[in-house]
Amino acid sequence: MSFSNHNFKNKKVLVRVDFNVPLDAEFNITDDTRMRAALPTLNKIIADGGSVIVMSHLGRPKLGFEEKFSMKHLVSHLSELLNKEVKFCEESIGEKAKNMSAELKTGEVMVLENLRFYKHETAGNLYFAEELSQLGDFYVNDAFGTAHRAHASTTMIANYFTGNKSFGNLLENEINSLEKVLSEPKKPFTAIIGGAKVSGKINVIENLMDKVTDIIIGGGMSYTFIKAQGGKIGSSLVEDNQISTALEIIEKAKKLGVNLHIPVDTIIADSFSNEANQSECNIFEIPEGWMGLDIGTKTIEQFKTVVTNSATILWNGPMGVFEMESFEKGTKAIAYSVVEATEKGSFSLIGGGDSVAAINKYELGESVSYVSTGGGAMLEYLEGKELPGVVAITHKEGFKVNED
Ligand code: AMP
């Protein structure tokens, strides 16, 4: 059953969110995107007449409580966003949390202390999961960013809510968007894969190979493909141990009739710097001492044609070192062509940390179909892996956990 079909009237709902937001030295939230992303879920539960127990991790605490990672710093902002006073419990489990939860009234919201102050959280400890579960009578997971981890609050806890568990609005949207691309993509379907390394994306490419019509390769990983084909790549980024993998991808694409688009020209620089001397050349003929840091003019034109003629687009990874203004042209051009295709009716999904950073840099997030919030989780989903946090909700009989 979809999240919107649940009625949370008189329910105490334990909601796992991803409020892992950046804080400055005075503990002010510098980017509240993740908090805003959870509002539809929280507001729906409140509007139904339920009460909410919010749980999340924040940062990477090492040994128990650390002031800078306390969830208390988020409480007043959450109160503003929800337009109601939010309570805070300085523990995640135990008597105090139980008493506060028992006293929660319809429409009230409380936030638990950082789950990762307890080492049991990331260990996926059953006792900790069970203790958390006693705080509510319904479990909602709305944290896509941690859905690939079998942690106590993202996975194990679901075991105690057979029949009383659901994705939240955000997590449900993430999965629906990913499924739209993976299960029934409208063709032509183009996957744009960029970023630094072949090794980081190989599993994604392999899983997509029998689903796509076209694969565009860009970014640092393209030079391994060029070297594999005998090209001269100067001092460009290369993974020598991935050369045979690159050749296998080229062969597999031929066999499956997938159009594999590899750059033909490149912007080169004499050092890894925004101020470096730069030039443009055939990507097979990069001079010694020069490195490719962006795709070239002809490549941009070719890639644009492929992208704007696609009905489904998946984009993961930039085309060059877009963080430097001198080498952002390729990534920017691809971003605009994804927008153009979307305007013509294509479904476009952008995901993976750096392509999201790129689309946000050009303020185009609203102009594509979906921007995924979960970097690592999205990558694993695209690799075809089952995410523990997803399985924990979809398994009707409860998520079978290893008691050892
Ligand atoms: P990834 O996290 O694997 O998607 O890689 C993203 C990173 O790859 C970004 O920080 C880019 O600056 C970097 N990158 C893209 N193209 C190149 C390139 N040609 N040389 C070196 N780094 C690159």
Image (tube, helix red, strand yellow):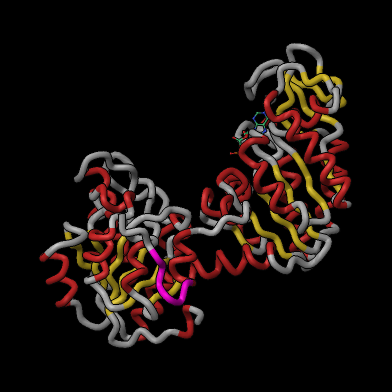
What residue span does the magenta drawing correspond to? 395-400
Q: Position of residue 102 (x, y in %)?
A: 16, 76
- What secondary structure do most residues of the magenta stretch adopt? loop
Residue 178 lies in what quarter of the image? bottom right
Residue at 40 percent of width and 72 percent of height: 398
Residue 33's place in the image compared with 361, above or below, is below
Residue at (67% x, 35% y) in the render: 198
In the image, 68 versus 395, the foreground residue is 395
**Residue under the image location 46 percent in, 76 percent down:** 396
Q: Is residue 213 left or right of residue 27?
A: right
Please give the name of the residue rendered at 71% of the width and 39% of the height, measured from the top-left corner: 319
**Which quarter shows the C terminus?**
bottom left
Q: Does the magenta portion include 360?
A: no
Q: Quadrant of ligand 1?
A: top right
Q: Which of 340 and 106 lies nearest the eye of the viewer?
A: 106
Looking at the image, residue 101 sits to the left or right of residue 318; the answer is left
In terms of depth relative to the viewer, which is nearer, 151 or 347? 151
